[in-house]
Structure formats: structure tokens, C-alpha cells
Image (cartoon, rainbow, N blue to C red):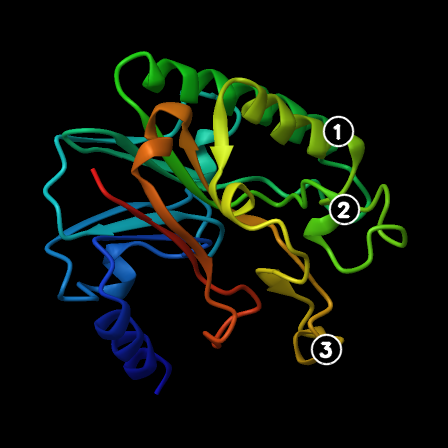
Amino acid sequence: MYRRKGFSFLNRERPHLLCLQETRAGPEETGRIFPGFPYQHWHPAERPGYSGTAIFSRIKPVSVQRGIGMREGDHEGRVLTVELERLFVVCVYTPNSRRDLSRLAYRQRWDKAFLRFLLTLESRKPVLFCGDLNVAHEEIDLARPKENRHTHGFTDQERSGFSAILGKGFIDTFRELHREGGNYTWWNVATRSRERNIGWRIDYVVISKSLRPALRKAFILQEAAGSDHCPVGVTLFL
């Protein structure tokens, strides 16, 4: 039933590109899915049932790249890049620093490596990257910032990592067009927080500054159920 609902959602929204994170599988396990997308690319983790990214496209890519060239991290399948004629599209599933922050130091190394990767791509053409970044950047991006200060996903280090990306000229598309609060993309299932909209905005679409004139819409589809996250997206006129 969930697959049927997924098909109806895609038929209604009709995205040109669909980026998925935490796929936990590859084409060997799933077979060919979402037939409306003729170009399907995966970056599964080496560890079965863990992490992973995928991009489904109606547009034929110029090239496809898996990973960011980080030896200690690329085996987790967290970054998948397709090169299109006018831009790179990067699907990213940023590492979680864990509840006890035991992976925070690794997360900081990963953030720096990911930024270097983005800048390398941008030296060739503009970049759009999207996905679960596992950080609420500003206090407006979560319902209870005071209670969650120093919690994984809202540490100063993780927020600074995202600030460093924006400081290099990248634009958080949703916050560029929407300054109001209450817009979240993830809710804790165990506490049924979605029903009360006690959430976090940790899923983003970010673009190179040079793409700003093409940005028409940035949206969060909170009504789309089926996950503890909801879809986010943009409309670009290129």
C-alpha cells in the first residue's frame, strides 16, 4: 500500500529529479522502481541495510559520481552526484553525531570534507545539494531550541559546519524565501510529535549563489506522510 501511495505522490508532484537518503538498499534488493524516471542511480553503503543515497531523474546526466573522496566515509554511501548540463545535483545524507556525541569529531571532519567537495564542483559549474543534513541551523529551525541546546543535531559545532557552507556563497533556499517559524521536516515518531508539530528542520535544498535568479519556489510538503521526515523541494527556471 505504501508503494502505491508513493507512486501517486510522484505522479501528482512530477519532479524532474527525486533525491532519496537512507535508502538502506540498492537496485539488487529493490529491482527497478519508480518507472517514470528512466535514469536511476544508487550509492548504497557497504554495510547492508545502512545509510545509502539514490537519485532518480527524468533528465539524462552527463556524468555520475559516488562519494566525496573521503577514505573514512565514502563506504557509507552518503553522497551521490549527477552532473547535468547546467549544474551539479548532489544528494547527501550527512552523518549523525549520535545522541552521546561520540561521532561529533568525525562529523566535523566530514563537514569540512564535504565543503571542499562542493567547492571543487562549483569551480566547474553551479551546484544544488539536498538531503538530510542532520542539523537545525538556527533556533527558528526547531520547535524547542532552548531544551535542545548542545543536543546532537543542534550543537554549536554542527551549526557552525553548516554556517561555513553558507559562508562560501551557498544559499539555504527555504530560508531565503520563508522567514516564518513552524516549518519542520522531521518529527520524533515515539513521542507522536508530528501531531503537535514539535519538529526540526533538518532537510534542506541548498544552491550556489549564481543560481539565485533561477529560484522560484522552495517548499516543505508537511502533509506528505509515510516517514518521520517529509519531502522538501525547489522549483528552478534554468
Q: Amino acid at mark 2?
A: Glu
Q: Residue furthest bottom?
A: 1
Q: Is residue 81 above or below residue 187?
A: above
- Answer with left or right where residue 30 lies relative to residue 228: left
Q: What is the x, y in percent for residue 17? A: 25, 51
Give the SS element for disc 2: helix
Q: Is residue 167 above or below residue 224?
A: above
Q: Amino acid at mark 3?
A: Arg
Q: Residue at x 30, y 54 (%)?
A: 26
Image marks 1 and 3: residues in contact by CB distance under 8 Å: no
Closer to the camera in the image, 195 or 67:
195
Q: Amino acid at mark 1?
A: Gln
Looking at the rendered structure, which numbered label has been put on residue 157? 1
Tell me how far mark 1 sits from mark 2, CA to CA.
14 Å
**On the image, numbered disc 2 is attached to which residue?**
139
Give the SS element for disc 3: helix
In primary-sequence order, the first of circles 2 and 3 is 2
Give the SS element for disc 1: helix
Q: What is the x, y in percent for residue 191? A: 76, 76
Q: What is the x, y in percent for residue 196? A: 72, 77
Q: Residue at x 55, y 50 (%)?
A: 178
